[in-house]
Image: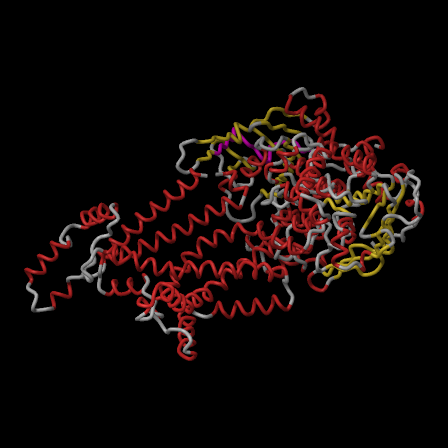
Amino acid sequence: MLDKAPPKNRERTQTLTSGDLGLPKPEPLLRISALSVDYNAAGGNVVHALRNLDLAIAEGETVGVLGESGSGKSSLALALLRLLPKNARVDSGSIEYRGQSVLGFSPARLRDMRGAEVALISQEPALALNPVLSLGKQLADLLLAHGKLTRLEVSARCSEMLRQVGFDDPERILRAYPHELSGGQRQRVAIAQALICRPNLLIADEPLSALDVATQAEIIDLLQRLKRDLGLAILFITHSAGALASLADNIVVMREGEAVARGTIAKLQANQDDYVQRILFPEKSLAQAAHTASTIESGAPLLDVRGLSKRFVQKRMLSRKEFVVQSLDGINLALLPGSTVAVLGRSGSGKSTLARCLAGFETPDAGEILLDGKPAANDKGGRPPVQMIFQDAATSLNPRFTARQIVAEPLEIARWKTDADRTVRAVKLMEEVGLDPDWAARLAGEFSGGQRQRLALARALAAEPRLLVMDEALSGLDMPLQAQMVRLLMDLQSRHGLTYLYISHDLNFISLFAQEVVIMDSGRIVERTTPAKLGESTHPATRELVEAGERLHAPGVEAAV
Amino acid sequence: MIRYLARRAGHGLLMLFGVSILLFLLFQAAPGDFLSEMKMNSQISPETITMLRAQYGLDQPLPERYWRWLKSSARGDFGYSFAYNTPASTLLWPRARNTLLLSVPALLISWLIAVPLGVLAAGWKGRWADRLFSGGTSALLALPDVLIALLALLVALKTGMFPVGGMTSINAQDQGTWAWLRDLGWHMVLPVAALVVGSLTIILRHVRASVIEVLESSYMRAAEGHGLPRFKLLFGYALPAAANPLISLFGLSVAMLLSVSLLIEVVMSWPGIGPLLLESILARDLFVVIGAVMLSTVFLIAGNLLGDVLLYAFDPRIRRQA
């Protein structure tokens, strides 16, 4: 990170005047100069979230901030509203809103600004709404906090705002509670909340990441319309270049708290910097790595699944009704050693149950699972040959364990050698998955999302498994990180002769990664094909996945690739 | 809602059955009965004792006795007190009323103090006010309830401002309703205070902990980012979201308070269920013990049922499931 050249282009003035509204004042709406934010992590470590960041937003302008996770984007959003957590502090620099220093605001002035002048849509809209208060109250409270309105005026404004964000029946939404709405609807309510006091600037921190593709497009359309209608300035923070292509006037690319490039999307696409290219075109960087993918050995399968069935019966107390869910229905599957098979399916198609059966968390009702021709279930004790990596690394790692403890735990359970040997091995494994061995004493909670997934991978490798079952192991990561992980996985596969069963609901990287694709629907395998032939499939379940995958490719990125 | 409550009430009824059966079995297992001591008395002939035994129904087998008790309970009559020679219910009802007279105000007062203080402490987390507060509550938590009651008695004795025990002064009844009420209130101050001090700390710590947890959530940060005033954030947004476990605690605190109340009644000679239960256990006065325990169980179930109703009213997510 230190070998990185200092930011070359500091064309602050260039970002100022790009709006074609004809600015009445030379002073921008918001100006950030040389802003640095530090976090005090445990153990006396200081993490620099932002370093010397310059940024300006004019009235009505949309500025995109693009960066992978851990690049300090969210700290920027929080710093602007002075919402940083207690262990963070603004080290140096200034934030000026209409020429006034935000860092010098009194608590009362700060409250006036928050929500009314500068509004925030936070990262996970589904979690940004209070679960026990009605949406009507949560909208109205903003108006009441920022102005003197009668009840009637308030409810009229709320209904009008909800209509503007695309609800046909605002009265129903006002009475509803968050859990009664879908994720996309909650996101729109969160946007309504942010805009109801008519702010001049909207800070949107990854407002799309938790949404499905169709809803993402809807929200982008909505933001574009509101920007036009209300003259709103937007600071749009994201890791996906696709969303910015159609929305942002200017883009700042961030890396490790620094602005490494800035300009319009066209200008950035021409930028030859490695990082900029990687974040704009995550798929492209992977193409070279694909050539090194190992070839499949032929012969006896490592894993042989025959007629596997599992059903769940849900019963209620004092009720005779039973709900039977046939989660797996006669699954046959064979994996050759050293191969990668992808299992694709919608949520609820039974793919996770398959993974859990293979890893031994569930006992199947019928059928057998053979590993090297022997029943897998009998293999108790020692180091299990099947390891599993879960979707959410954050919850699969004990946050109070250090990295070393986490990686060494499987070895400890298997009573492998001495404590010192285990430590050496844990450190080596960390290195192998691309983690700094110096971090062995850090707590799991101090790692970022991508690093945690690597840690989970190192833990799985500790047992020297033959088969790795990855249940949506990459879905929680953003695209550049996914690409990195895929590269790492392919590397490890060729080095250790690992076999992968990769379970997912989307098609990202599948073509580079898997030799065989299995499509599941309602507990059955409905199609077996290769990644190359996925597009030609006529099966409705496959088509649905392929079409969703096509929509997921962001327009800007696709055009450039 | 009605189905949900009916189900909960059904569970409560089942629990009452279970408790009563358990009590009968326990009494059966304990050596002797109310009449055993009479055998020592040479002036009472064995024939009299046999006769009395038949009269009280103690010569019947256990299932028969239980069945009889169940039938009479269904009529609201909980059997007969051997020691006082009156129906158990005439003994129990006034005592139950006296116990409620202590525990209901204590319950309300401790919650009314604990909720705002706990929320404020959570809002001040880490500052000196919160540290002082946490230290104070841990110290209070370490005090046994008996000690609190004894300290209260000491206060009464030293200052002379409060009565040292009982429920009313001897001549209170003669001076008219108003004076009687004032006298009663005066007698209530110390026992209620002892009860509040005993239960307050636990509630306070729970309120503080669950509000702190909510304050760290992303929706609280979002609400702060919307510029809502601090008071509203704490009491209008954090408290309702934190209320769920607290309401369950409310149901439990009824039971907690009741058991503490029995102890304090004995120490401060308040004529509630506590002293009666103690006496009747010592005298093996079967039906009074069973009645007293059953009444406590009823209070407990009522407390939990109240908690369920409140939960239903407060949490829209539960409303939907029910």
Residue closer to the observer: A291 or A513:
A513
Position above or below: B215 against A174: below
Work out which residue is located at the far top of the displayed protein and give it.
Answer: A538
Total labels: the figure holds 0
**Residue A490 seen anywhere in this rendered image of the structure:** no
**Left or right of A332 in this view: B165:** left
> How is the protein colored in the picture?
secondary structure
**Residue B297 seen anywhere in this rendered image of the structure:** yes
Q: Tell me which residue sits at (33%, 70%) in the image.
A: B169
- How far across and how far down the image is residue A57, in percent? 86, 46
**Left or right of B117 in this view: B151:** left
**Left or right of A534 in this view: A408:** left
- How far across and how far down the image is residue A101, in percent? 84, 57
Residue A1 colored in magenta in the image: no
Residue closer to the observer: A304 or B81:
B81
Q: Please provide the residue range marked out in magenta.
A: A296-312
Q: Quadrant of residue A540?
A: top right
Residue closer to the observer: A529 or A207:
A207
Residue closer to the observer: A253 or A276:
A253
Work out which residue is located at the far bottom of the displayed protein and give it.
Answer: B158
Q: Quadrant of residue A245?
A: top right
- How far across and how far down the image is residue B124, in percent? 64, 62
**Left or right of A65 in this view: B305:** left
- How far across and how far down the image is residue B309, in percent? 46, 46
